[in-house]
Amino acid sequence: CGVFEVVVTTTGELKAKNSIDIDGPVGARKAGIYQLKISRLVPEGSVVKPGDFVAELDKSEIVGKLKEVEINLQKFQSQFTQAKLDSTLTLAQARDELINLQYAMEQRKLEKEESIYESPSTKRQAEIEFEKAERAYAQAQANYNTKVKQAEAKMRESQADLSKEQQKLMDFQQVLGQFTIMAPEPGMVIYAREWDGKKRVVGSTISPWQPTVATLPDLSKMESVTYVNEVDIQKIK
């Protein structure tokens, strides 16, 4: 007698066992962007080489944020320049005051030395004036040192704000460059799938948590994915 075969027919999908993901910007979350819409995408099945264009994302949100950073950067640059000018002017005035007080102190010292031949009251008055000049100079010196420290602190704060905004600008520019997505390796472009199984196409959105736009499958090792009805499982060997 012949062989009696029980055949179960199912539908499924042939796909590569291994593949390389083609992802969107790695710094999108750092830039505060959480939804990125695909505006251009090469046809599925396109064969690409490393560096070939694969997709482009909508840049309107990142461009808007970049303009805000540029405006803030100009503001911080102005504040830094103003802080530098203010510090220069304040310290210059303080130095002039020190020089004038030093001259006054030297003048009082001469008057004190010349008063040794005067009456005791005149001599005492000269001593008092010299001591007052000394105290005024010492106080001005202390005030100058304080103003130097204040100026340094203000400059450090202003420089920190400026540097932070400059770094933010560089980060945004780097992320913007990643909105044009290139192939990392050679291969055939296959669209990535959403959580519900639908393929990502032009108009679909990706996120920092699901950044894959497409994949480059390794066609040398394939597998078939299929689903068998529960009632037919016992027929499968």
Image (cartoon, rainbow, N blue to C red):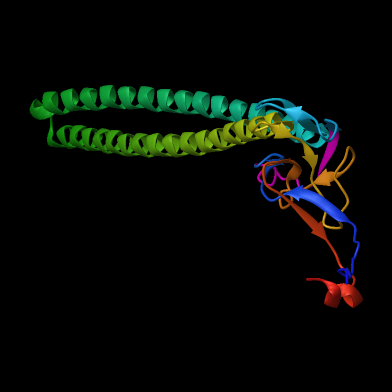
Q: Position of residue 78 (x, y in %)?
A: 61, 26
Residue 33 belongs to magenta span: yes
Residue at image x 64%, y 33%? 185
Name the one closer to the observer, 89 or 214.
214
Q: Residue furthest left?
A: 117
The N terminus sits in image quarter:
bottom right
How many labels were placed on the picture? 0
Q: In terms of image quadrants, where is residue 49?
A: top right
Name the one closer to the observer, 138 or 49.
49
Name the one closer to the observer, 44 or 89.
44
Residue 24 belongs to magenta span: no
For residue 140, above or below residue 11: above
The C terminus sits in image quarter:
bottom right
User: Magenta part of the protein: which range?
Assistant: 27-39
Residue at image x 76%, y 31%? 54
For residue 10, above or below residue 200: below
Q: Name the dominant secondary structure of the magenta segment.
A: loop
Q: In terms of image quadrants, where is residue 94?
A: top left
Q: Position of residue 115 (x, y in %)?
A: 13, 27
Residue at image x 33%, y 27%? 98
Name the one closer to the observer, 154 or 183.
183
Residue at image x 87%, y 58%? 196
The answer to whether 189 appears left or right of 97 in the picture is: right
